[in-house]
Image (spheres, rainbow, N blue to C red):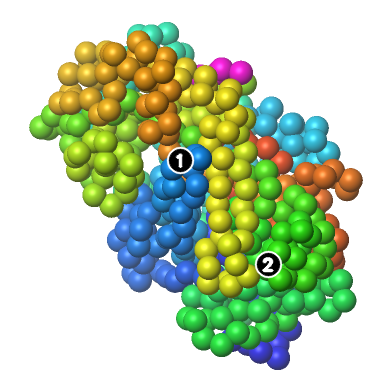
Amino acid sequence: MAQGRVYDDIIVGAGSAGAVLAARLSEDPGRRVLLIEAGRHYASAATTPEDLLDANAMSLVKHSWGFTTQLTRERRVMFPLGKVTGGSSSVGNTVVIRGTPQDYDEWAGSGNPLWDWKHVLPVFRALEDDLDFGDRDIHGRGGPVPVRRWRPQELTEVQQAFLDVCLAAGHPWAEDHNDPGSTGVGPIPSNRRDPRVRVSTAMSYLWPASARDNLSILSRALVDRVVFEGDRAAGVVASVDGGPWETVRARRVILSAGAVASPAILLRSGIGPAEDLRGLGLPVRADVAAVGAGLTDQPRIGVFMTPKPGYENEGKSTGQIVTRTSDSRFNDQYYAMVNRFDLTLHFPELRRVAGARAVFGVMVVLRRQHSRGRVTLASSDPFAAPRVDLGYLSDERDYRLLADGVRGCWELASSPKIFDKGDQLVALDERVMDDDEALRDYIERAVDSAYNPVGTVRMGPAGDPGAAVDQRCAVYGVENLHVVDASIMPSMVCANTHLTVVMIAERAAALLRDRG
């Protein structure tokens, strides 16, 4: 660890946001940047493990923080988030869908005018290398993030069946889910250049930047807290491989550790709800009630079956076709055909009720829910995992949304084109579908997370009690400390969050360069 050296920027977390920030800020050769990552760093394709290269599988165990979450009042489940350079972009499902213009205009309307659709669309265009529609005005060509859609000849039989069923049910054809006005059914845009290899932010941003003399990458290093000189952030305290705690100094500190770890670091640094900090014996540096609060995520549930022989789809991408529909908001429901959920390592709740190694079926993801959760500390020990309470089903309105979603899945999955490829339904049948109480029980037992947590260090104007950072990502109550990741999102977007997080990092890098 480079003690004695003072960096211009320390970035904590090398995930979907941190890798982008490190690459962009280090473009200035006069700026010394240190990127700290708690997981491993693989510097080339030759050294990257197969589970991180394979875009057709989620790696939710080997490179995970191992977090759990209190999903509902009754259920605690796995909550895998990526612990490796590239973060969850290195382990996840490779879906790259933008939020809707309404999503970002809502951010602006809540006091963040720098983040409306007019400001963020050019950022999306610049970061994209759209391999299909890059010649259109709303898209970009030549950016770091490849965007590729599934070709008709690449679809599995169940995906083609799902597409046919959706079209027959009246869902409009959507060739480009990243068109601002697009809705309906079409191929999933994915961050890959070919059908097989995942392109994470580590690959697309860090690898090209890693040869710069002014960029240092410190991996397998856990950050405890931010250190201060007066009210100014002056560095961080970190431990490499469980070794001694050491202080690394910088003129500015940027937390990009994600919606769970960033608020945890702030809390250990004495920034958060004063009463909670005192209860843990932590000094109160800034009483910011919003730190850790406002957690929201995207619930998923579905109609699943064990596959008949020939439809196991082993080695195939989880999803290839999606249809987006609207309930209370444009494109707030997302129905996808799941080629295969491998239950040997993942999704223990589904494995318990399925009694099988793998399932397929139709899944719905609620892009917007009413329930809110919270991230808190179990202890001041940085090696102790934070408490994550997603708060699912704490708002009664979400039962109705999920019930509508399950009914939509049932309607699509019941088509013979899909149903006849299954062997046995999992924990669901016509009796359950016809009984409101039985369906409610199914929702309580089967709902799970799509792993898109946001909002725990929310962005908003001064005086907003729900805000922890301003629209330039600066933490309230202290100086020279910023947060740039999914935690600052003022509200959820109607999409997978990855592409929005990359956009946040690109936009924040420009704002931070303006501040020096």
Provide residue 401's location: percent of width, then percent of height.
Answer: 52, 22
Q: Which residue matches tag 2?
A: 280
Q: Residue 74 bears which disc, if any? A: 1
Q: Are marks 2 and 1 in contact (CB under 8 Å)?
A: no
Q: Position of residue 259 (x, y in %)?
A: 60, 53
Q: Among all residues in the image, which is located at the extreme left?
A: 309
Density class for disc 1 (Cα within 10 Å; few <14, some 14-19, many ≥20) is few
User: Which percent across, then down, holds residue 432?
Assistant: 32, 17
Determine whether, in the image, residue 101 is placed left or right of residue 512.
Answer: left
Q: Is residue 408 left or right of residue 3?
A: left
- At 50% from the left edge and 39% from the top edge, which residue is drawn? 72
Instruction: Residue at 68% x, 37% y: name it.
Output: 491
**Observer-nearest of 47 and 1:** 1
Please give the count of numbered marks on the rendered protein: 2
**Mark identifier at residue 492:** none
Q: In the rendered structure, which amino acid carries the disc numbered 1?
A: Glu
Circle 1: element type: loop
- Name the spot of residue 403 as percent of width and height, x first: 45, 20
Question: What segment is highlighted magenta in the picture?
Answer: 323-328
Q: Vertical placement of 162 versus 140: above or below?
A: above
Is 363 contained in the magenta span? no
| Amino acid at pointer 2 | Leu
